[in-house]
Structures are given as C-alpha cells and as structure tokens.
Image: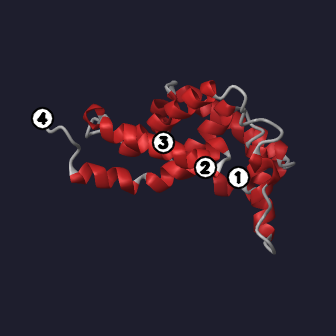
Amino acid sequence: MARHPSPEFESQVVAQLAPLRRYARSLTGDTAWADDLVQDAAERALSRWTSFKPESNLRAWLLTILRHLYIDQLRGRREIAVDDESAPWRTLEAPRGEVDGLELRDLQRALYQLSTTQREVLLLVCVEELSYEEASAVLGVPAGTVMSRLSRAREHLRGLLGQDPARRSTTPLRVVGTTR
C-alpha cells in the first residue's frame, strides 16, 4: 500500500477547499480561525487518506473532519464562544451601497443567534447542499434529527428576521435553504 495519497486524491481534496473554507467561516465567524481550521482539516485528510472510503462522499468526509477539529478547538478555547456578544461577525459592516449587503448582514447576525446545532444543520443542508443522509453522517445523528433541527432552524431564523409565515414564499430563506 502506498504511504502517500495519490495525486488524484490530493487534487480532489484541493478542489474541496472553497466549500471547506465557506463552512469554516460560517462556523467560526472569524477568517483567520477558519483558514487555520481548513488547513488543519486538509492536513488531517491527507495524512489519514487511507481511512477514506472511495465509494463515499469526499466533501462530507472532509466536512466531518473540519467539524470535529472545530469542536476540539472550541473545547480548547473555553474563553472564546462563537455566540459571544463581542464576536467579530456581530460588528461586520455590509458592503457599501448595497441593499443586498444589508440583508446579508442581517441574515448573518440572525444565523449566529441560532444554537450551534441548528446553525450547523442549516449550513450543511442549505449552504453546502448536502442531503439529509450526508448531513446526518457529518453530524453523527439520525437523518430524522437532521430534518427536525433544520425545520426548527428555519422557523427560528424566520422569527429572528421578523418574517411572518404569510411571507414565507418571498423570504431570503428560499435563497439560503431548499427543501429536500
């Protein structure tokens, strides 16, 4: 057995760096921390490439690695909480002159007011477009739990954004989330 991953495997991992970075930034709200997480996840994936099952979903496997690293780092950073009132994402400015930027900022702030479990499932299913089964594998919970958390996350997010049920068909959540 080869001691190093194949160049094909390495290139497949590299091709997943953008989704990993997006997920890491969404989890942490901090660019530097997210970049470190992605680098650590890529390193771990490449060093443990033999544990990847070729018939499985590489992106889901990488997201699982990243999530586990994130949880480990949260435990190690007891003084830093992503839901903290002073978290950097709470003071981010919207792009100048863009109404969409304001809506995005509001959505981002509301997203970080969700519980970590709701935020994770929303990001995996609605942003990363994983199936319920893939998200279930990443989170280590049954698919039914993913569906339940997603439903509660969407409802909570709608409430945080001040959107009543009658406006659901025109909410920004339709951009963020899709039904499966």
- Identified at 14% across, 39% down, the residue is 2
Quarter of the rendering occupied by the C terminus:
top right
- Identified at 73% across, 44% down, the residue is 111
**Residue labelled with disc 3:** 131
Q: Could you tell which of marks 4 and 1 lies nearer the N-terminus? A: 4
Q: Position of residue 141 (x, y in %)?
A: 52, 24
Colour scheme of this structure image?
Answer: secondary structure
Give the crowd class for mark 1: few <14, some 14-19, many >=20 residues within 10 Å. some
**Residue labelled with disc 4:** 1
**Residue labelled with disc 2:** 32
Quadrant of the image occupied by residue 5:
top left
Q: In the rendered structure, are the residues bearing label 3 and label 1 in contact, judged by CB atoms less than 8 Å apart?
A: no
Report how far apart the C-alphas of labels 3 and 4 lie in the structure: 33 Å
Label 3 or label 4, whichever lies nearer to me, is: 4
Q: Could you tell which of marks 3 and 4 lies nearer the N-terminus? A: 4
Q: Position of residue 74 (x, y in %)?
A: 62, 29
